[in-house]
Amino acid sequence: MDIIFYHPTFDNAYWIKTLSAALPGARVREWKRGDNEPADYALVWHPPVEMLQGRTLKAVFALGAGVDSILSKLKAHPEMLAESIPLFRLEDTGMGQQMQEYAVSQVLHWFRRFDDYQALKQQARWEPLADYQREDFTIGILGAGVLGAKVAEALAPWGFPLRCWSRTRKDYPGVTSFAGMEELPQFLQGTRVLINLLPNTAETVGIINSGLLNQLADHSYLMNLARGVHVIEADLLAALERGKLKGAMLDVYSKEPLPAENPLWAHPRVAMTPHVAAVTRPAEAVAYIARTITHLEKGEPVTGQVDRQRGY
Ligand SMILES: NC(=O)C1=CN([C@@H]2O[C@H](COP(=O)(O)OP(=O)(O)OC[C@H]3O[C@@H](n4cnc5c(N)ncnc54)[C@H](O)[C@@H]3O)[C@@H](O)[C@H]2O)C=CC1
Ligand SMILES: O=C(O)C(=O)CO
């Protein structure tokens, strides 16, 4: 079995060594321009069109959870990958735990008013503030798939009212599930902390706009852990200005790296990380890919296949 590997920034030698160890008998090589030798599987992130074009692969694996970039490239270059070749993505592979750490720590930061105390500290003011109450701190998770479910699981023991919104109804312990556009207003009403874990699709781009933010509880908080294009940045800034939003924690942006002139950098109530909420963990990712290839080779059922029409 031949496997080609391409990632613009990873330590490719390490990945190839680890994959070779996990799939004894497989010949794994780094793909370089001009390599037209046969391959059975391709593992990719931001692949050049010529890497995949014209190949009869058994499957392609995206080396991340989100497949928006590869799907948009496929839209521009449909010749890159035949519809019949399945595309897989990483399901959790250690990203769930990272999202849990991020979301729990930030929710508690806001709930314990550390943002307010930080502002008071800057003015050298000693001023105990009123506690927030759990019942006023409803957390809503937009997107209740692999990562949304993990975040809900980690937040559940903290006792905040917890709800999620997804395409189809979910049955997660301690979580009220809302499904479809028609239930979005109910989901938003009373939500104090909105955590975004939706995929980037034609239906979800720009979903976090003034119309949506206005339906949240007053003085609410936004955590965007999914993709920058979900949020209309001008609407976010306006909601912060008029106090509808008290704060935002952003990991992803409409343009990355975020340009120096973007007003989000200087906003006192916006906290930011540079797209690191959950990164691909090589050992877990290799184990998942090796397991999936082994199942595929035996004709056994697998999970993680992307629905190219649906967009995630
Ligand atoms: N900031 C970061 O470091 C990272 C960000 N991500 C982002 O997180 C996203 C989510 O990842 P997973 O949970 O693995 O995806 P997933 O496919 O397992 O879950 C997606 C969820 O969104 C819901 N959804 C999709 N379209 C919808 C619509 N139109 N209306 C209502 N619900 C809809 C689905 O029902 C599902 O519950 C990725 O697509 C990626 O963009 C993923 C990893 C790291
Ligand atoms: O896996 C993804 O989709 C990511 O955003 C990784 O940072």
Image: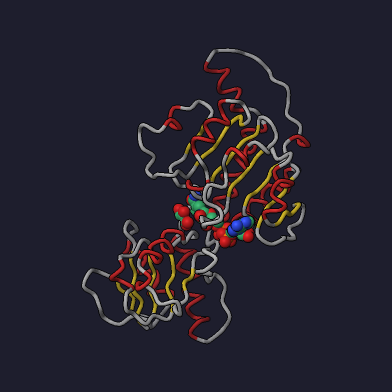
In the image, taking residue 225 as reference, residue 176 lies left or right, namely right
Picture coordinates of residue 98 (x, y %)? 54, 51
Residue lying farthest bottom? 298
Picture coordinates of residue 193 (x, y %)? 65, 39
Decide which of 291, 198 is in the foreground and name it. 198
Picture coordinates of residue 286 (x, y %)? 45, 68
Residue lying farthest left? 34
In the image, taking residue 147 as reference, residue 268 lies left or right, namely left
Decide which of 256, 44 is in the foreground and name it. 256
Q: Residue at x 65, y 15 (%)?
A: 127
- The colour scheme used here is secondary structure
Quarter of the rendering occupied by the N terminus: bottom left
> Residue 51 occupies which quadrant of the picture?
bottom left
Q: Which residue is drawn at 67% across and 51% down?
A: 152
Q: Is residue 51 above or below residue 58?
A: above
Q: Residue at x 46, y 59 (%)?
A: 68
In the image, taking residue 180 as reference, residue 254 lies left or right, namely left
- The total number of labels drawn is 0
Q: Which residue is drawn at 40% across and 65% down?
A: 75
> Residue 115 occupies which quadrant of the picture?
top right
Decide which of 182, 244 is in the foreground and name it. 182
Q: Is residue 145 visible?
A: no
Q: Can residue 111 be seen in this view?
A: yes
Picture coordinates of residue 5 (x, y %)? 34, 69
